[in-house]
Amino acid sequence: MFFIWCLSRGSRRGQYGADVEGAAMGLLNLTRRARLAQIFAAAIAAIAMMAARPAAAQTSIKFSLDGRLEGLAATFFLPQDRGYFRNEGLSVVVDEASTALEPITRVASGAYEMGLADINTLIKYRDQHPSPAVRAVFMVYNKPPFAIVARRSRGITEPKQLENRKLGAPPAGIAFGEWPLFAKLNNIDVSKVTIETIGIPVRAPMLAAGQIDAALGYSFRLYVDLKDRGVPVDDIVLMPMANYGLKLYGNAIIINPKFAAEKPEAVRAFLHAFLKGLKDIVRRPAEAVESVVRRDDTVKKEVELERLRMAIRDNIVTPEVRANGFGAVDFTRLGESIDQIGLIYTFKAKPKPEDIFDESFLPPADERRVH
């Protein structure tokens, strides 16, 4: 009423004008304060609702490597470090293994959901332990890294010359398991080859010192270790078994069947994140190897970088991968590799390729292309 009265006395503005303007501004400020209070209250309510809402649940995955920490482990640590797994709703823990068989037994037991393992070892393990039906879901080493590394100065440049020589081999090594097949395919009389059982830590030192004439191992491990020991490159003879008749594949990502059945989308999400990281690694290996170096300050960056680059060139990005994309297998070739294993191993029930490799979890073909 005071406001209306003041307006009606417009001729006396000089006396009451200030009162009118003050009253108007007061009402305006009250309105603004009321609106601000409403907005503030709404914001507080929204924040409270968000705080009360549970965080999106992440699926936990324990992943087993196939051995010690080295450059190739970057294929799993880099997507972890860059948040690729986390962005897929996954909480991934990556652990080293002490033997090549360990990732398979870990995944088979259910202690680990996924792992990296030699598919040929898996084939033989599945023959002995058909249940649970552990399968491979993504081929990482399209060309197996099994190799014999020899010294030219010891008179060895080809497989047949291993006869009457001393060959060093870790007893639990995967390459040693493929030695009989390599010998058979290359007409090597194994009775004429002296096998000296040695540990992995002394394999390169003994070969460098001339205590053995050749050694069995993964190419990117043994070759790079020998070079790091100071052996001249022109004295190192690398014989990848795949170049001498073996049609076998190498290491693949394997999956626990119960986990795959219960959480198939988590498996697909893992492979999607892994593939994204793998492409990063192929493009920029020098950056990727930092994921390994920061986890173990005893490794040499330049050594692990060379190891990683060698594996990318020789085992991961092969002509078959360039044609068919990352992760897949040629089921005809996989069938032939199972037949080759049968040349030196007696199956209880020889598996079909589809029993060993499940392609249903692979990312789309367009996504797996090599650019």
Image (spheres, rainbow, N blue to C red):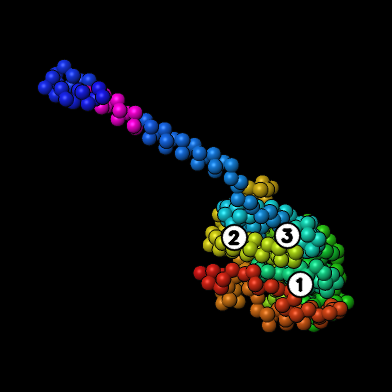
Q: Which residue has dot 1 on it?
A: 120
Residue 317 at x, y percent in the picture: 59, 70
Note whether 39 is above or below 96 in the view shown. Answer: above
Residue at image x 59%, y 68%? 363
Is 13 displayed left or right of 303 in the figure?
Answer: left
Q: CA distance from mark 2 to mark 3?
A: 16 Å
Query: Can residue 10 be found in the magenta stretch?
Result: no
Q: Amino acid at mark 2?
A: Ala
Q: Which residue in the rendered view is the most extreme toward the top?
A: 15
Residue at image x 18%, y 26%? 7
Residue at image x 84%, y 79%? 349
Task: Please tell me whether mark 2 sits on a helix, a strand or a loop.
Answer: helix
Note whether 208 is above or below 26 in the view shown. Answer: below
Q: Amino acid at mark 1?
A: Asn
Q: Nearer the viewer, residue 166 or 265?
A: 265
Residue at image x 78%, y 73%? 123
Q: CA distance from mark 1 to mark 3?
A: 20 Å
Residue 182 at x, y percent in the picture: 77, 77
Q: Which residues are magenta?
A: 20-32
Mark seen at residue 273: 2
Q: CA distance from mark 1 to mark 2?
A: 25 Å
Note whether 96 is above or below 220 in the view shown. Answer: above
Q: Residues within 10 Å of mark 2 (few under 14, many from 20)?
A: many
Mark seen at residue 113: 3
Q: Earlier in the sequence, mark 1 or mark 2?
A: 1
Q: Residues within 10 Å of mark 1 (few under 14, many from 20)?
A: many
Of badges 1 and 3, the one in the foreground is 3
